[in-house]
Structure formats: C-alpha cells, structure tokens
Image (cartoon, rainbow, N blue to C red):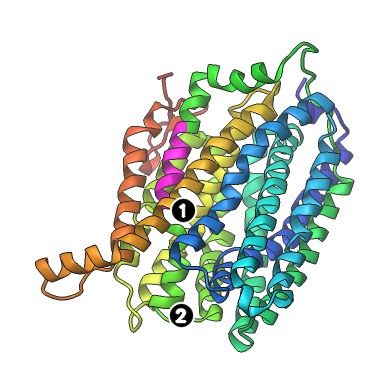
Amino acid sequence: MNASQSFTQQEMKKSLFLITAAVIFGKIFYVTVTGAPFTGFLRALGANDLLYSIIAATPFLGGIFQIFASYVLEKTGKRKLIFLISAYIHRLIWIPIVLIPLVVSQENKSMALLLITAFITLYSMANSVVVISYSSWMGDIVPENIKGSFFGKRMAISAITGILAGVVSGKYLDNVNSLVSFAVVFIIASFFGAMDASCFLGVKDPPLTPLEKNTSFIQMLTEPFKDKNYLKLIIFISCWNFGFNFSTPFLNIYMIEELKIGYFAISIFTQLVSGITTVLFINQIGKLSDKFGMKPVLRLCCSFVSIFPVLWCFATSSRYIGVMSVCFLLSGLFQQGVQLLSTNFSIWLAPEKNRSMFLANFALITTLSSGVAYICAGMFMETSKKLIWRINELVFGKQVLSNFHVLFIVSALLMLLSIIFVLPMVYDKDEKKFHLFGRRNLPVKNQ
C-alpha cells in the first residue's frame, strides 16, 4: 500500500493545505537571502569574483551531508523531527550571518568573510537535511497521480509571493544600500522562514517503509547506483546543472555591475516579469507531465532555458529592457518547469523503500556539480579578462566580447550537449510522444 493511503482523506487535505501555505512564507525567505541581495551583500564585504563564487558554491557543496542525514533518517524514522530541527537552523542562521559585518571592524573584513563562510557552511548542511527529509516526506504524502498539478499550483502561489517580496526588498535596498539595510532585510526574511517551517508542524508524517535491520550504511549508499536508470537521471541532471550554473552566479553581477541595474529593477525582472508566466502557465507544465510523462516535457523546458545565456549577450547598459524581459518571461515558465520536473522525476523514479537514500545520492552528485560549476566559473572570470581582451584586439581591433559573454556562450553549449547526448538515455515509464494538431499519443518503448 502506498504511504499516502495510510491516513484519512481529511488528514491528507489538511496536510496538502499546510504544505501549500508554507510556500508563501518560504518564498519570502528564499527570494531575500538568495539572488541579487546575497550577491550585493558579498560584494559590499569586498568579495572578488573567485571568493564570491566559492562562498556562493558552499550551499551546493554542503550536499555531501545529505548521505549521512539520509542514513539517520532511514534508521530512526523520525523524519518530521529531523526536518523541523534542520529547517529552523537553516532559516534563523541568517541572523548571525548579517550581524557579523556590523560587529567585526572594517579593518578585519577578511575575518568577517571567514566567519560568514563558516556559518553559510552550517546553513548548507542544515539545508541538505531539509531537502532530503522534505523530498522523502512529499514522496509519501502527495498522491503520485496529482504530483505535477499539485506542485505546479504550489509553484504558482510561490511566484506571486516572490513578486511582492522581491519588489519590496529591492526597493528598500536601492533606497538604503548599506550593510545595515542588508541586516534588516535578511533578519525579517529569517523570521518568515521560521514561519514556513512552523507550517509543517501540522503536516501528517506517514511511517517510512522500514529497512531490514541488518542494512549497513555502505549497502544504503551503493543501492541507488545499482539502479541504472536512476543513475542515468543523476548523470543528466548533474551535466545540466553544471552547464546552467556555469553562468548563473554571475548573471546578478552582470546586471548590477555591467548593466548598472538597481535592486528594484532586478526584482522587477527576476520576480515580477518571471512570476507572470509562472503564475499563468506553470500548472500547465505540471498537467502535461502528468499526461505525457516527465521526460518529454523536461526536454522541452531544458531546450528553451539553454538559449537564455546567449540572449544575455545582447544586453547593454543602455539597451537591456527588451532582452531581459524576454529572458525572464520565458524563464518564469521554462526554468521553473525544469526545477519542478527534475525534482518530481527524482522523487517518483526512486522506489518507496530506501527512497531517502536514492534522493540523497541524487542531491549529493547533482548539487556537487553545481558547486563545482560555480567555482570553475569564478576561476574563469578571474583569469580570463586579459586573455579575452587580447583576443578582441587581435580579431576585432576593439572590445566586442567580454569574459561575461564567453561565460554565457559556454554555459549554453554545455546545456545543449547534455540535452542532446545524455537525456535520451533516461527512461520514463510514463513517457508518451506528444504532437501538435491532435495526433495520437503513443507510449515510448523502454530504452
């Protein structure tokens, strides 16, 4: 019997409502402590491109902790308790992070950055526990036949909240741009994050599928790699994440420092413009995946996202509104679609038994690939400026391409290669070929 059938219809409705409500508070937290505000905070502390990329990569590199968290989760079965403890740490730790620069003197900026990196490492470890316990929990509580539409609706609500939170915080940071203003915004966000975690106090936690008593840590660790199809999914998402995150961390710097866009305007693009298509259409992505399978819809979304970095190359400080509007309008649908589908794919392709360890292996490798991409991008940005300037002189006689442009082009190529060569290897039992103009949908044979 599926775990979601082990409690009453009323308990399920209440749980699904609280999970949906939580995202309202959670989005306020995530919009504020990530993206442009986080980039601005680190740059205000004096972090160069390489140091910025290393600190920004820390949350991804903390994913290694998920393996141990999953083992504890499977052995104890106390999923809800583990989730709540790690979630409160994850949300509230931003209070000391933003207070450090106000306590440590300006002469000790390096010490402040070191302490902040240490706290962000702890933040990333807590986040890895939150993610693995949450994913395992949702796999047991959300009925599989509505997973796409449920999380699609949840993401649409998240987008609406993100618009409001991003615009308000962006406007404030533009008007009061100082370390104190970052502290005010991040502390308020932390309390909203704690409210997000509190919503899960009332969510039903079905019992985990028990493991055999003699199951060792090594057995749990290696089991997911014996599932060849799940391993192929891990490889694809890892390749995709590396390509996507090779440029993503520097898009904020590109907008702030190269295009001279303020925080408020950035929030308009990243939250309002992007949120419009998320709110209007993301639920359709979920419904399409329920009807045709996740793989064909994921391929469609990934194909569009891979084009965005190339479009960024055409933006300038005097001509960026059109380019950014197109990019973020489409991103609100297709990038959010990639996030929705890759998460759902990882949860429901894993078996109920030992699911959390499957998800831990998935998260470990895919997040590590993102972290490595951040650091590689930082190294590229720090070392390539003079070389690209010389190439411009030799080929064009003047500055035409910057290291940002080259970074974006390489990112797009890496994403396209993963779609063309790696995604076809993944088998989706629910995949159906879908065509325009109402042609008959046919199931796809096992590859």
Residue 375 lies, in percent from the top left, at 45, 52
Q: Residue at x 86, y 40 (%)?
A: 81
Q: Considering the image in quadrants, where does the N terminus appear?
A: top right
Q: Can residue 268 be seen by looking at this rendering? A: yes
Residue 304 is a magenta residue: no
The mark closer to the camera, 2 or 1, is: 1
- Which residue reaches farthest front? 107
Q: Earlier in the sequence, mark 2 or mark 1?
A: 2
Compared across the picture, whether 225 is left or right of 210 comes to left
Residue topped by disc 2: 261
On residue 374, which mark appears? 1
Instruction: Give percent across and percent down for residue 141.
Output: 76, 35
Instruction: Examine the image and state in which quarter residue 21 appears.
Output: bottom right
Q: Please state if 56 lies on the left or on the right of 316 as rendered.
A: right
At a point 52% along the width and 42% down the height, the residue shown is: 368
The structure residue drawn at horizontal position 82% and vertical position 60%, both measured from the top left corner, is 195
Residues rendered magenta in the picture: 235-246
The number of numbered badges drawn on the structure is: 2
On screen, residue 76 above or below 81: above
The percent coordinates of residue 237 (x first, y second) are 47, 38
